[in-house]
Amino acid sequence: MTLHNFTRNADYGYVVVPKLQPKDDNRMVDLAEQFHSLHKRRGIILMLAIAWDARRAKTIEDTGAEAIATTSAGISRALGYRKDAMIPAQILGEAVTQITKIIRIPLSIEFETSYTNDRAQFGETLKTAIDSGVVGVNIEDGLFPPSALAKKIERARHTSEALGINLFINARTDVYLAKIGDPDERLMEAIKRGLRYREAGADGIFVPGLADPASIGAIVEQVKLPVNILAASDLPPIAELRRLGVRRLSSNQEAPREILAAVKGVGEGFIVPRETNPLLEESRNHGHIQNLFSP
């Protein structure tokens, strides 16, 4: 199997994109299957922390993480783009490759708005991500009609199967996060969308903003896909989430914001008083960090 052999398809607009980094094809297949298996463990929740570059990803892996995710905002800002900017596929691929070449666990990326508004570019951009080592994606509906996400899921499944990778497609619905429709109707709307996305080929359903235990249980029971919840202060305890059948818990944006605030604090502590101490206090062992990035 060669991941980069790919021909153009008139219906989906896929084109050949050179591989950005030589990959072990068998290892990618194994990582994809490993990522799927992490969502099938009864009573065990996959705790998915986020990173946006190789250094943070490797540090998270060092904590014992089983997999890592990226956010579109994190990747965009790390590359100097606005959150809502359309990052070119090649640049996205290079950024992802920097992560996958150094970690040994599955990587899933947030494929928000597919990094392009051009439907013909969807397959090319997704293929670049897979060629860069990605084995899972989040694709959201946002404020678009469910039919739009269903079509993207179908294309994503078609693309990944053509590449020989069992990509984990996590369908994200923003019914709760974006407060779509009447509050009393959101549960049924989320279930209806989840069923539609499952039929289109999704492997999991992500419902950020959902916290009510009864609603979580209803989605688990009726959609019959691994349910992904976003970490929040109003969530039930982790033991309750296990009982309800949640299979994946994603960290929120607070960690990146705290890190940026800490960097800002160190910078201000160095520049304003012109002191070196802030750069030395509470620093992690330099040798340990060096070892993380050893071949």
Image (tube, rainbow, N blue to C red):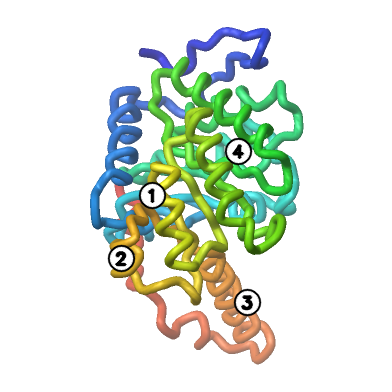
In the rendered view, does 203 fall on the left or right side of 14?
left
Residue 221 tag number: 1
- Element assignment for label 1: helix
- Element assignment for label 3: helix
Work out whether residue 260 or residue 44 is closer to the camera in this orientation and state it. Answer: 44
Q: What residue type is labelled 4?
A: Leu
Gap between marks 2 and 1 measured at Cα: 48 Å
Label 3, residues with CA under 10 Å away: few <14, some 14-19, many ≥20: few
| Residue appearing at x 66%, y 11% in the figure | 11
In the rendered view, does 47 fall on the left or right side of 53?
left
Gap between marks 4 and 1 measured at Cα: 36 Å
User: What x and y, as percent, mark residue 25?
Assistant: 34, 23
| Residue appearing at x 67%, y 15% in the figure | 13
Of the image marks 3 and 1, the number of the one nearer the N terminus: 1
Residue 92 tag number: 4
Work out whether residue 110 or residue 188 is closer to the camera in this orientation and state it. Answer: 188
User: In this rendering, which labeled residue sits more in front, label 4 or label 1?
Assistant: 1
| Residue appearing at x 33%, y 38% in the figure | 36
Of the image marks 4 and 2, the number of the one nearer the N terminus: 4
- Mark 3 highlights which residue? 264
- Element assignment for label 2: helix
Of the image marks 4 and 1, the number of the one nearer the N terminus: 4
Of the image marks 4 and 3, the number of the one nearer the N terminus: 4
Gap between marks 4 and 3 measured at Cα: 26 Å
Q: Are marks 3 and 1 in contact (CB under 8 Å)?
A: no
Question: Where is residue 286, by image quadrant?
Answer: bottom left
